[in-house]
Image (tube, helix red, strand yellow):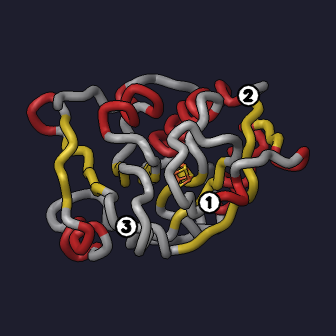
Amino acid sequence: MHVKHPKDHALSEMEGDGIIANIRHMDISGNESPYLTANIHFSGQCVVNCRDCHSNALFRTALDDKRNIQDVLGWIKDQYKLGLIQGICILGTDTVEKERALPPLYAFAKYHELLTIVYTGYVLSKAIWSYGVPDWYICGPYVGGEWYQGKTFYKYVSEQGGFYRNVPREEYFIPEIINKGEAHGRQTQPRSEI
Ligand code: SF4
């Protein structure tokens, strides 16, 4: 499947102004990938509706979940300035409103050369339609057992017009392999300019 990478789009990070999204919490960890990422956990009724959803707590939005994407970008920017993150990871429920929230986050990531990773219950084609083209997709509904069962890992490859390569889970979690010959071996360090 040939896809155009949104990193080629000249989106301004200011586009996040006025966009409100349901986000339950934000944190930093290296558990979702081999990188330290700013993790944005979206909430709201998930349209995938997996049986035995493992994120039930995120289905119902709380008043506190309403956040302006500009504020979210401000938080991400702070983590970036401190040198704490190598990427932005999108998690949580799949909702239509979430689609509007991602382009400004991608734009910020593009400008600062951060990775973008999206976890979703959608299959790849639906994910691209809804969320565009991040560096990584972890796709597929929850089927029970370990969280990764039923999930497919895709890495965006810019060659030949751009497409997603199916990557074994083991490869996704081993940075020495996925960094080989690529520009994603980013180091964390404080940045004085932003
Ligand atoms: S995609 Fe995730 S959040 Fe949505 S129903 Fe399935 S397990 Fe729950």
Q: Which residue is at the front of the view, 104 or 39? A: 39
**Where's residue 106, x and y in %?**
50, 38
Residue at 60%, 35% (x, y): give it: 95
Disc 3 to disc 2: CB gap under 8 Å: no
Ligand 1 within 8 Å of disc 3? The answer is no
How busy is the neighbourhood of tag 1: few (under 14 within 10 Å), some, or many (20 plus)? few
Label 1 vs label 2, nearer the camera? 1
Write the residue at 78% across / 25% down. Answer: 18
Q: Quadrant of residue 3?
A: top left
Mark number for residue 55? 1
3D distance between C-alphas at marks 3 and 2? 31 Å
Picture layout, residue 75 above or below residue 71: below
Tag 3 residue: 148
Q: Can residue 174 be seen in this view?
A: yes
Q: Residues within 10 Å of mark 3 (few under 14, many from 20)?
A: some
Residue annotated with mark 2: 19
Q: Nearer the viewer, residue 41 or 28?
A: 41
Nearer the observer, disc 3 or disc 2?
A: 3
Q: Where is residue 183 in the image (x, y as percent from the top left)?
A: 27, 57
Q: Are dots 1 and 3 in contact, CB under 8 Å?
A: no
Residue 167 appears at what percent x and percent y?
20, 59
Q: Which of marks 1 and 3 is nearer the N terminus?
A: 1
Mark 1 or 2 closer to N-term? 2
Point 46% across, 52% down: residue: 119
Disc 1 beta carbon < 8 A from ligand 1? yes
Q: Earlier in the sequence, mark 3 or mark 2?
A: 2
Query: Callout 3, which amino acid?
Result: Tyr
| Location of residue 80 with respect to 19 vertically, above or below | below
Circle 2 — which element?
Answer: loop
What's the amino acid at mark 2? Ile
